[in-house]
């Protein structure tokens, strides 16, 4: 697929008030294809959010380069065009809600761009339909559930018609139902609407939805590949302080008890099939 985001030799150094410097991103070379779904995982402080904020020029490189759809973030003339191409959705949706009703909140961005009223209405309708909030269009945001508030933040980003959305731990403050709503929407935005998706998450089960996983540690990408390949590297993940997805963890525990199911299992269906195969082969779980 065609490159959409590219970084070359990217470093980002934070300078503290006491004069110390912290390199949050170190020598990152990365290409994300148009329409790809990438998950960024890693321990706290590994540089995930710092890296992602370079994708829409919220941060600029200390050294190295970042290109978005062929536009360099180093050129100030490109910043507005880059930010129209790459939207951001953060952990706390309350910080992105600015209006008194759902539809007014989604319209806020297009209105600030002085778009014609008919186009604003169309963008609001399309965005609310994509996230499943059409029936709540006149509802005050404070009346929404946590998951619906996060979907409202997604709709606000969609109204700008971006090519890519970066989700920075969007489910971390939600209950299981809200997490399911948001993750289902993220999957559909990628698979049906063709959006490029970058998902930062601490939930390994969510990362399995991505086409490719990038694991970071101390500012560097230290592991990458498709979910099955990444989560098969159990010892490496443990060294990084990262847990396995639930089904992969159950499979690991079964192996510890003598049941030879293979690494890389990610779903309940895969685990069930593996156990059925072992039972047919005459292996009795301990």
Image: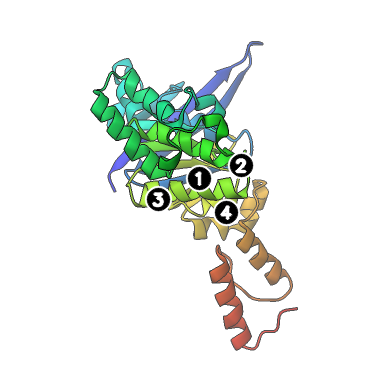
> Residue 162: percent from the left, percent from the top?
33, 34
| N-term-proximal mark, 1 vs 4 | 1
Q: In 3D space, how far apart are the residues under numbered discs 1 and 3 (Cα atoms)?
A: 10 Å
| N-term-proximal mark, 4 vs 3 | 3
Q: Quadrant of the C terminus?
A: bottom right
As drawn, the label of residue 188 is: 3
Labelled pair 1, 2 in contact (Cβ < 8 Å) = yes
Residue tagged 1: 182
Labelled pair 4, 3 in contact (Cβ < 8 Å) = no
Residue at figure coordinates x 34%, y 33% from the top left: 124
Q: In 3D space, how far apart are the residues under numbered discs 4 and 3 (Cα atoms)?
A: 17 Å
| N-term-proximal mark, 1 vs 2 | 2
Disc 3 secondary structure class: helix
Residue tagged 4: 205
Picture quadrant of residue 231: bottom right
Q: Badge 4 local density, few (<14 within 10 Å), some, or many (20+)?
A: some
The answer to whether 29 is drawn above or below residue 261 in the figure is above
Residue at figure coordinates x 27%, y 31% from the top left: 70
Q: Is residue 63 visible?
A: yes
């Amino acid at each position: 697929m065609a490159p959409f985001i590219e970084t070359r030799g990217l470093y980002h150094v934070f300078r503290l008030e006491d004069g110390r410097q912290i390199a949050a991103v170190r020598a990152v070379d990365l290409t994300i294809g148009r329409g790809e779904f990438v998950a960024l995982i890693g321990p706290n402080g590994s540089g995930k959010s710092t890296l992602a904020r370079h994708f829409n020029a919220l941060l600029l490189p200390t050294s190295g380069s970042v290109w978005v759809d062929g536009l360099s973030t180093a050129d100030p003339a490109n910043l507005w065009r880059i930010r129209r191409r790459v939207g951001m959705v953060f952990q706390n949706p309350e910080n992105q809600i600015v209006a008194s009703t759902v539809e007014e909140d989604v319209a806020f961005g297009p209105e600030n761009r002085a778009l014609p009223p008919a186009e604003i209405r169309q963008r609001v309708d399309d965005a609310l339909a994509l996230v499943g909030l059409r029936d709540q269009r006149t509802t005050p945001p404070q009346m929404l559930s946590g998951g619906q508030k996060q979907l409202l933040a997604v709709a606000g980003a969609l109204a700008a018609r971006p090519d890519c959305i970066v989700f920075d731990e969007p489910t971390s403050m939600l209950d299981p139902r809200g997490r399911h709503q948001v993750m289902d929407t993220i999957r559909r935005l990628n698979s049906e609407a063709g959006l490029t998706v970058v998902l930062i998450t601490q939930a390994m089960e969510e990362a399995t939805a991505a086409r490719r996983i990038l694991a970071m540690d101390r500012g560097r990408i230290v592991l990458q590949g498709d979910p099955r390949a990444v989560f098969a590297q159990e010892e490496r993940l443990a060294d990084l302080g990262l847990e396995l997805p639930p089904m992969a963890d159950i499979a690991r525990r079964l192996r510890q008890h003598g049941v030879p199911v293979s690494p890389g299992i990610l779903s309940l269906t895969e685990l069930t099939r593996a156990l059925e195969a072992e039972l047919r082969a005459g292996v009795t779980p301990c």
